Amino acid sequence: MNWTTEKRYLPYDKWPKEVLKQLQKQAARSKYQMHYHLHPISGLINDPNGFSYL
């Protein structure tokens, strides 16, 4: 996949479902995928430290 600036910042709901599933599978096979921290199936969480704010 050729990552252009337009593609990189395309809103999540604008991506085709097939592309999202392909990226999810690719992330699941990655040796860098976290398996013991809170994370979404795909994409990013904006502020993971917000859960621990007192």
Image: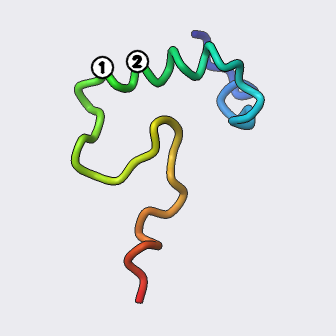
Mark 2 highlights which residue?
A: 26
Quadrant in the picture for residue 8: top right
* Crowd tier of the residue under label 2, counting other residues whose Cα lies within 10 Å: few below 14, some 14–19, many 20 or above: few
Q: Quadrant of the N terminus?
A: top right
Image coordinates for residue 32, horizontal then vertical, percent: 26, 32
Q: Residue at x 42, y 82 (%)?
A: 53
Q: Is residue 1 left or right of residue 40?
A: right
Q: Residue at x 71, y 24 (%)?
A: 15
Confirm or deny contact between disc 2 and disc 1 (CB under 8 A): yes
Question: Identity of the amino acid at label 1?
Answer: Arg
* Crowd tier of the residue under label 1, counting other residues whose Cα lies within 10 Å: few below 14, some 14–19, many 20 or above: few
Question: Identity of the amino acid at label 2?
Answer: Gln
State the CA–CA distance, disc 2 to disc 1.
5 Å
Dot 2 lies on which element? helix
Quadrant in the picture for residue 26: top left
Mark 1 highlights which residue?
A: 29
